[in-house]
Image (cartoon, grey):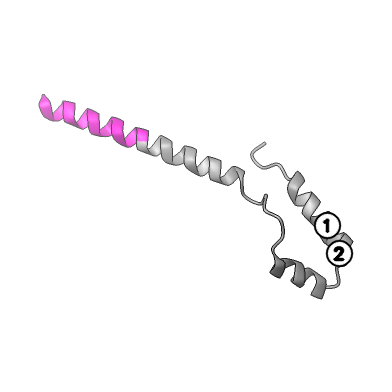
Amino acid sequence: MISALIGTVIMSAVTVAMLLAVDVTDKALVKVGKYPLTRQERQLLIDAGFNLNDIENINAEIKLLKFNE
């Protein structure tokens, strides 16, 4: 009887831990892709033939991206 009670407590704790892990992962994925271009990425685009106006347009599009909708 006590072992069943201990098992139930352990299962409940594991379930809560898994739900918290899913919540943290979901919050992290919402932020994915919302960072502006780095200096190295900007330089790579310039080397590829993009001008500064194109790069600013890319940054604006990155800000408009909506994940998880």
Amino acid type, residue under disc 1 in the picture: Glu
Q: Residue at x 80, y 75 (%)?
A: 47
Main SS of residues in magenta:
helix
- Give coordinates of residue 66: x percent, y percent: 71, 41
Q: Secondary structure at mark 2?
A: helix
Q: Residue at x 79, y 50 (%)?
A: 61
> In the depicted view, which residue is nearer to us: 64 or 12?
64
Numbered mark located on residue 56 in the image: 1
Q: Residue at x 61, y 46 (%)?
A: 31
> In the depicted view, which residue is nearer to us: 4 or 36?
36
- Give coordinates of residue 11: x percent, y percent: 27, 33
Quarter of the image containing the C terminus?
Answer: top right
- Give coordinates of residue 55: x percent, y percent: 82, 61
> In the depicted view, which residue is nearer to us: 52 or 13?
52
Amino acid type, residue under disc 2 in the picture: Leu
Question: What is the residue that sits farthest to the bottom in this orientation?
Answer: 47
User: Up-down: is 13 above or below 41?
Assistant: above
Distance from the alpha carbon under mark 2 to that under mark 1: 6 Å
Instruction: Look at the image and say whether residue 38 sits in the magenta stretch.
Output: no
Q: Residue at x 83, y 57 (%)?
A: 56
Q: Residues within 10 Å of mark 1 (few under 14, many from 20)?
A: some
Query: Which image quarter: residue 30?
Result: top right
Query: Which image quarter: residue 7?
Result: top left
Q: Is residue 34 left or right of residue 8?
A: right
Q: Which residues are magenta?
A: 1-16
Q: Is residue 18 left or right of residue 68?
A: left
Is disc 2 in contact with disc 1, using a CB cutoff of under 8 Å?
yes
Q: Residues within 10 Å of mark 2 (few under 14, many from 20)?
A: few
Quarter of the image containing the N terminus?
Answer: top left
- Give coordinates of residue 57: x percent, y percent: 84, 55
Q: Name the residue beneath numbered marker 2.
A: 52
Numbered mark located on residue 37 in the image: none
